[in-house]
């Protein structure tokens, strides 16, 4: 439980004092440039190790079946074609997968943000006996992996007819410990004078929430939203157990169907095309908003 | 730590209206958490006392029979060993390599921002999709890795059929995906190391390596402790990547993976709940242990 508690202090380190100019010494300078070279090499290797497999995936998804099954290593397709995509789209309802992923992500992440804002507001600005205890009970859920809760939730939701429905996909994941924790921290750092002045002007809780707290904490709320969007888009285990009808599957769940044959060589083309379709939306969002996403994930600790 | 952050606040009289408002704000989230997080934990304990096929309406009470069967059958030893190897290897490699990358990122060089974003990117990708990508790369016959090894006259290891190599493959891919998290957290820790101490050590003639191990690394111990806790919790929860790379768990069957396969593949709900309960107990004990014992050894400045 200490994990999420200490995260923000680590993620926002104090600004290091500016270094005074160094005396120009030859030995030092040579040592330094060697270190710079070593660090550049480290970064180059790290970047290549991450990028090459992704680039390889991208190119492979345009290769022909014979090219894909080749025992020689080739990065570029010998003949560019979109057959793998057509095949994947014909075999499986990828349009529905996209639609379902979008619905689950937008509705799920949206509701989680609303719940987190409400809960954090109540915990910070309303008086209630034992509210600290309630906060700890919410925070403790960060320690409970979704895998531990999946069987009882499956029995409950499928018993209520929630298999292969949107509400069944979305509802059990809505409770949010991560968002509540992050927004509570953010709300506690808001300038109290502004809120007290608003209260003296006769603004009720509702008005203070909408006109003061939400605008002032907007960056933190956006961070929570982003992290939850990524989390919902990638979520795998719950969609895996609660959907059986391909028309109700999300993308991450749906591409499981491509892996049903044990003969990888025969199916690898559509698998690569499907994998590209799952990864590219997240990579695009990440490319645009990477600073906020990195901040969100490193402040939050364990999960969405 | 949370108390320290809360601003001094006027105490107000208890008012019913405010209490009701609090319930309206906090109630929905708490209700969802109670039903979908806390209730399952209790229900799991109950299910674990049943012999129950998930597709059947009938179950027989077996008391602690599932626990006895799990621990005596040798299944527990095998699965817990796999879980331990996977967790120790992924935590160790993520922290060591993460620190290496963080030290490089900490130098203010051009292109560092791009490198940081790139290294972090796999962390936000779907674990199952990442597994499919690497399954193709590792495939001994048609994969890129095998082709590269063949071009230098080596043969590809049989990552798919040899259970031990499958576990190694899963560990490699898991570290590839999660390394960026440790690197970014370590980077924040490195940026908080005061430069005056490092400069004093430098003037005393300490070499760069000596400075790192005698000054920087001890000062990073709160960060290392934080990462030990979070990366370990994450590793113990790893699932998407495991099932993607090792569909039936013949090499990488950790406790969480076994609980899934037992419940949803074999249909043995009672045994699955038993494993989930053991896992949750393990997580609770480890978290407590880390809080009580490890944190004392941490060097706070």
Image (cartoon, coloured by chain):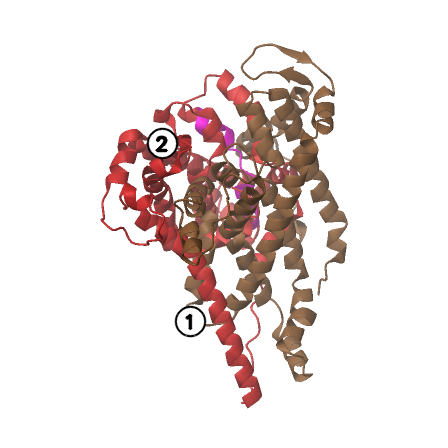
Q: What element carries label 1?
A: loop
Q: What residue is rendered at 42% in x and 54% in y?
A: B150
| Rendering coords of residue B16 (x, y %) | 61, 31
- The secondary structure that dominates the magenta segment is helix
**Chain A drawn in what color?**
red
Tell me: residue B239, above or below residue A226. above
Label disc, if present, on residue A100 of the rendered structure: 2
Split into 4 quadrants, where in the image is the N terminus of chain A? Answer: top right
Q: Give the range drawn in magenta.
A: A168-185
Q: Is residue A129 visible?
A: no
Q: How many marks?
A: 2
Q: What residue is rendered at 52% in x and 78% in y?
A: A34
| Rendering coords of residue A27 (x, y %) | 57, 87
Label disc, if present, on residue B299 of the rendered structure: none
Looking at the picture, tell me which residue is in the foreground, A176 or A303: A303
**Chain B drawn in what color?**
brown
Callout 1: few (<14), some (14-19), or many (20+) C-alpha neighbours within 10 Å? few
User: Left or right of A89: which side holds A3?
Assistant: right
The chain identifier of the residue carrying mark 2 reads A
Q: Does the magenta stretch include residue B145?
A: no
Residues marked 1 and 2, same chain: no
| Rendering coords of residue B24 (x, y %) | 53, 31
Q: Is residue A175 magenta?
A: yes
User: Left or right of A177: which side holds B88?
Assistant: right
Q: What element carries label 2?
A: helix
Label disc, if present, on residue B110 of the rendered structure: 1
User: Between marks 1 and 2, how big is the CA–CA gap?
Assistant: 41 Å
The chain identifier of the residue carrying mark 1 reads B
| Rendering coords of residue A179 (x, y %) | 52, 43
Single out the residue that lies furthest toward the top.
Answer: B58
């Amino acid at each position: 439980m200490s994990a999420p508690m200490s995260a923000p202090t680590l993620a926002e380190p104090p600004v290091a004092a500016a270094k005074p100019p160094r005396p120009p010494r030859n030995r030092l300078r040579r040592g330094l440039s060697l270190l710079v070279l070593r660090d550049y090499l480290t970064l180059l290797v790290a970047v290549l190790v991450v990028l090459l497999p992704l680039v390889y995936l991208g190119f492979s998804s345009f290769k022909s079946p014979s090219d894909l099954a080749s025992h020689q290593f080739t990065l570029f397709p010998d003949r560019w074609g979109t057959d793998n995509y057509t095949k994947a789209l014909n075999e499986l309802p990828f349009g529905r997968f996209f639609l379902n992923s979008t619905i689950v992500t937008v509705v799920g992440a949206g509701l989680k943000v609303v719940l987190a804002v409400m809960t954090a507001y109540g915990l910070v600005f309303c008086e209630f006996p034992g509210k600290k205890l309630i906060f700890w009970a919410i925070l403790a859920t960060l320690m409970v992996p979704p895998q531990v809760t999946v069987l009882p939730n499956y029995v409950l939701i499928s018993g209520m007819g929630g298999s292969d429905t949107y509400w069944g996909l979305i509802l059990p994941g809505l409770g949010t410990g991560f968002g509540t924790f992050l927004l509570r921290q953010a709300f506690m750092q808001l300038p109290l004078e502004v809120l007290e002045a608003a209260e003296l002007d006769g603004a009720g809780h509702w008005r203070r929430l909408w006109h003061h707290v939400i605008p002032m904490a907007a960056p933190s709320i956006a961070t929570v939203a982003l992290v939850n969007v990524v989390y919902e888009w990638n979520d795998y285990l719950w969609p895996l157990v609660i959907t059986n009808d391909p028309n109700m599957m999300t993308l991450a769940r749906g591409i499981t169907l491509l892996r049903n044959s044990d003969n990888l060589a025969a199916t690898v083309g559509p698998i690569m095309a499907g994998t590209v379709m799952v990864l590219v939306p997240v990579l695009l969002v990440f490319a645009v908003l990477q600073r906020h996403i990195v901040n969100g994930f490193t402040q939050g600790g364990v999960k969405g | 730590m949370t108390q320290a952050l809360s601003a001094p606040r006027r105490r107000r009289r208890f008012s019913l209206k405010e209490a009701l408002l609090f319930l309206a704000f906090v109630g929905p989230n708490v209700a969802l958490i109670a039903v979908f997080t806390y209730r399952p934990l209790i229900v799991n304990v109950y299910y674990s006392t049943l012999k129950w096929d998930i597709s059947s309406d009938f179950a027989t009470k077996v008391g602690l029979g599932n626990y006895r069967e799990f621990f005596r059958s040798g299944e527990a030893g095998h699965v817990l060993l796999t879980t331990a190897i996977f967790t120790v290897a992924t935590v160790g490699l993520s922290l060591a390599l993460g620190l290496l990358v963080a030290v490089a990122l900490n130098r203010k060089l051009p292109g560092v921002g791009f490198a940081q974003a790139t290294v972090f990117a796999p962390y936000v990708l779907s674990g199952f999709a990442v597994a499919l990508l690497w399954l193709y790369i590792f495939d001994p016959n048609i994969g890129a890795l095998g082709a590269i090894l063949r071009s230098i006259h080596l043969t590809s290891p049989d990552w798919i059929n040899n259970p031990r190599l499958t576990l190694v493959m899963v560990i490699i891919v898991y570290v590839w995906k999660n390394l960026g998290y440790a690197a970014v957290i370590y980077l924040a820790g490195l940026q908080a190391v005061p430069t005056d101490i490092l400069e004093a050590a430098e003037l005393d003639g300490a070499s760069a390596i000596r400075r790192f191990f005698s000054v920087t690394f001890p000062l990073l111990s709160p960060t290392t402790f934080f990462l030990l806790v979070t990366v370990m919790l994450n590793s113990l929860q790893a699932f998407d990547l495991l099932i993607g790379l090792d569909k039936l768990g013949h090499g990488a069957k950790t406790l969480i993976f076994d609980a899934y396969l037992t419940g949803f593949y074999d249909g043995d709900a009672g045994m699955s709940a038993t494993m989930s309960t053991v896992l949750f107990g393990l997580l609770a004990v480890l978290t407590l242990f880390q809080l009580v014992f490890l944190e004392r050894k941490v060097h706070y400045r």
